[in-house]
Image: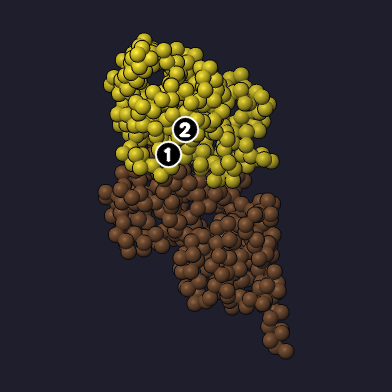
Chain colours: A yellow, B brown
Amino acid sequence: MASKCYNSQIKGVILDITGVLKNGEEAIPGSVDAISRLKQQSNLQVRFCTNETSVTRRSLVESLQRLGFEIEEKSVFSPIPAMCKILKQKGLRPHLLINPKGVSDFCEVDQNNPNCVIVGDAVDAFSYQNLNNAFRCLMKMEKPLLFSLGKGKYYQDNDELTLDVGPYMAALEYAAGVKAEVVGKPSKTFFDAVVEDMGLLPRETIMIGDDIVNDVGGAQDCGMLGVQVRTGKFRPSDENHPIVKPDAYVDNLACFVDLMLANISVKLSKEDI
Amino acid sequence: MASKCYNSQIKGVILDITGVLKNGEEAIPGSVDAISRLKQQSNLQVRFCTNETSVTRRSLVESLQRLGFEIEEKSVFSPIPAMCKILKQKGLRPHLLINPKGVSDFCEVDQNNPNCVIVGDAVDAFSYQNLNNAFRCLMKMEKPLLFSLGKGKYYQDNDELTLDVGPYMAALEYAAGVKAEVVGKPSKTFFDAVVEDMGLLPRETIMIGDDIVNDVGGAQDCGMLGVQVRTGKFRPSDENHPIVKPDAYVDNLACFVDLMLANISVKLSKEDI
């Protein structure tokens, strides 16, 4: 990885949160210190990019701060603000199938007489009844319109693989005969907004995540480098993925930061010569 | 339809149950009498073919008999017996995600240390927890093996469209990266068994159902005629379906039987000449 990162003159790092910084409610060993070193020992810009919609951005950041992470709310990008912008631009009124904890983020949005459905990682709210309600809402529309806050297959929740929003997006697509518009990773619009916020070009940016398709593949499709950690939902079979080939694998975030900082030292010493 | 049915010398009729005979727990007007006339006024063989797995075959037949239908258990084909046969032939031990009312049909099947997952129309048992359990079971297998008892998108339950097994099959396929093997309609193996039971050829058989893909398209793919009723889950947009073109549409089962009996009269009178 060293040579690639050096050659591509990386100026910004985008980090996934679940599976990279933490698993469930626990910090992944070494990750708190890794973020601290990345911020203090480099000039790299750092952003966090998550499809997490089960909590508000504020409470997500607060819980990460309690774990010891140096993280500010403005550096975290999640799908709900992007979704609200689309709703406003297009005058859409959503029926929500999302985590009840995320509903307050839509409190300013008109939800009467819905003309679109939004599916997020609703966890236990993914009941048969709720999926039926979302489905019936789609079937009543002249032209069904479905948005999905991410399309991840699953994530690592403490010790278990747990279904993400993607399978439920697929269920609604199948039932109603529609194709969902994905808001969040791996949507190009979503990644572009993060890169733009850093004032960088995609090729100056590196994404690190545990999801080979949505983090790594999504970033690569946008022209960034994509690195997969061997934590979170990483599975050995990812290293033989038929489509996505990460620019590098690292055992965990701490290793990634070690390499990034070493590259910077190499770069500085070469420039010093 | 008349000429087609006459020309093809139909000798057997296969009927879907939900959406053709009944909606929810109510007989569709005219359908009880239609079955009676079909059996008494023709020499046509009659079979019933359903993907219903929420009740045992016996209690399904009993509930139809209570509604007044002339129907015997041996004339009803449903996916569970076909599934049990496959499990036995292949020595498979299933993890079941099906309606609790159908579980007793698998009581003789070893379900320890499962090496396949079976998804059926589990209705309220399609909780997030239960779908996660089925998903985790698949992910623990070296080569995940998923069976789906049908692949219908939805059905008409009383006044509402209601999600069928298909969307949940699609969710598990997406999450675990597998392709389900469908047992029940529209599987050719399943239809062939019904036709064989009648001792007929597919071209001597007509299927009538409310599901344009799984009833009509499935039957046509097996060489039978396929007729769609405008009851049950029928929707006007079905008449512009991009792939499946039924051999005929009829307003309901009673109309279908009227036409079949009229054709037989025509045929008889021609033969009499």
Q: Three-letter amino acid code at disc 2?
A: Gln
- Quarter of the image where the C terminus of chain B is located: bottom right
Q: Are marks 1 and 2 on the same chain?
A: yes
Position of B226 with respect to B149 (left or right) is right
Q: Which residue is mark 1?
A: A244
Q: Three-letter amino acid code at disc 1?
A: Val
The x, y position of residue B101, in whole percent, is 41, 50
Label 1 packing within 10 angstroms: few (<14), some (14-19), many (20+): some
Q: Is residue A214 above or below residue A55?
A: below
Q: CA distance from mark 1 to mark 2?
A: 9 Å
The x, y position of residue B143, in whole percent, is 33, 50
Q: Which residue is mark 2?
A: A220
Position of A142 with respect to B156 (left or right) is right
Position of A165 with respect to A254 (left or right) is right
Q: Quadrant of residue B107?
A: bottom left
Q: Are marks 1 and 2 in contact (CB under 8 Å)?
A: yes
The x, y position of residue A106, in whole percent, is 57, 22
Q: At 29% across and 59% down in the image, what residue appears?
A: B91
Q: Quadrant of residue B213?
A: bottom right
